[in-house]
Image (cartoon, helix red, strand yellow):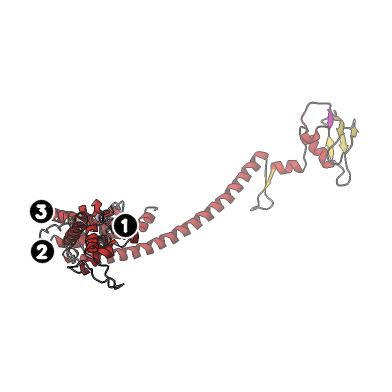
Amino acid sequence: MFFVSKDTVRVISELRMNAVASFKSEALLVTDKKINLIYGLNGTGKTIISNYLHNSDNPQFVQCRKTLELSDSILVYNQTFIQENFYDSDSLKGIFTLSKENKTAEEKIAKATTSLASLEGKLKRKSEEKQQVSEEFETQKREAVDEVWKIKTTYEKDSVLEDCLDNLKKRKPLFEYLCKITKPESQPEKTIQGLREEMDALKGESAQEQPSLPSLNFPAQEIERNSIFNESIVGNTDSQVAKLIDKLGNADWVRKGIEYLPKHVDENGQPCPFCQKNTITSKFVDSVKNYFDATYKKQIDTLEEIRKSYIEARYAIPRDISIYKNHQFAEKRVAALTEKHQELTELLVGNISYIKQKIEHPKLPQALKSSVEALAAFNNEIKAINTEIEAYNAQLKDRDSNLNTLKGSSGKGVLWCYFQIETGIVADSRIW
């Protein structure tokens, strides 16, 4: 490299390089020459000196110094100057643009051109993707139109629902109509089949007011709460045989055996069938009969009357409940009616058995089961059926209006079926 001073006055009189690139220690150049030539092998520091003179404010030259004779600016032509001021176009080899400003503009243009090419590539890919999505959408739409039309042809044959689908005679108008209306917020509670049955019930000769079903009544429920079943019924404790009977605990057996005693016993007595001795005397017979006194007999008679009344009340509950199960509004409750009736019947039969046990063993407490809940459970099923009957009878009173309402509900049901197929297609179409 070389540097030249202006006119006859040297520009640089002294140059110090230190702590940069190959200058590990300070190197000093003092000159009084107008033209100075610096040469050397690669890496000796020629380029770093030219870079220092080109931009001495660079932080890497903080320990370098130069002494100037004049305040004129220093012009440097080196590789850095070339990179900053010359732009070599890739498309036009050998053609250069001079000036730093022009180079910057050319670089921006090149960058923008590259970016434009990238964006055009992305746009092309997006267009291809859009085309693919559009084709898929059209395929799905055709399939949806066909499926919607199947629903139409299914229900248009139904005379009950024909009014719901009127004026929709072609595939595309039907589908376009569905795309414009609002989808039902939720699935209708009643099925189309259920609505059809309701509409059938309101039309024709069979559409007549229905009587309510009677509830079951069991008047013997008070018997189940009778305190006598919790009492211990015993004989006359003043009888001579009372202690013996109580000790043996066989009062029930003794009471049944009284009927086998001879009606007339003389003073000599009758032989015992077990020991064959004349132990059965009139005094013994009187003592046994005295044990089962009037109070005891009255309580036993009361139990017998209770048993009779309870059995009569039980037979007031019908064994055959066909009158309930065969009713047109009881179809969904046949199983429940059968189950509740069986539970009630078994409970009543069980209580009859408990009463019999109390009569046979009056000393032992024998509580009955309450039939209140079982009876109420059966009657609740009847109540539910009667509610449907009442609603039906009310509909009959305003038949025409209710038929129109059912047709509207049927239309919503059909629309719900449509939207299960059509919703996804409509959602996709709105993207475009």
Residue type at mark 1: give it: Lys
Magenta range is: 62-75
In the image: residue 394, left or right of residue 9: left
Query: What is the magenta segment's predominant secondary structure?
Result: loop
Query: Residue 395, image x and y in percent?
Result: 14, 54
Picture residue at 78% right of the left edge, 37% below the top: 76
Which SS class for mark 2? Answer: loop
Q: Nearer the viewer, residue 425 or 370?
A: 370
Q: Nearer the viewer, residue 421 or 61?
A: 421
Nearer mark to the viewer, of 2 and 1: 1
Label drawn at residue 28: none
- Position of residue 229 relative to residue 21, above or below, is below
Picture residue at 13% right of the left edge, 60% below the top: 202
Label drawn at residue 243: 1
Residue sitting at the far front: 268
- Position of residue 157 relative to residue 217, above or below, is below
Query: Residue 265, image x and y in percent?
Result: 19, 67
Q: Nearer the viewer, residue 250 or 331?
A: 250
Is residue 65 highlighted in magenta? Answer: yes
Q: How busy is the neighbourhood of tag 3: few (under 14 within 10 Å), some, or many (20 plus)?
A: few
Q: Residue under circle 3? A: 397
Q: Residue under circle 2? A: 204
As measured in the structure, the alpha-carbon distance from the residue carrying label 3 to the one carrying label 1 is 77 Å
Q: Are marks 3 and 2 in contact (CB under 8 Å)?
A: no
Q: Earlier in the sequence, mark 3 or mark 2?
A: 2
Residue type at mark 2: give it: Gly
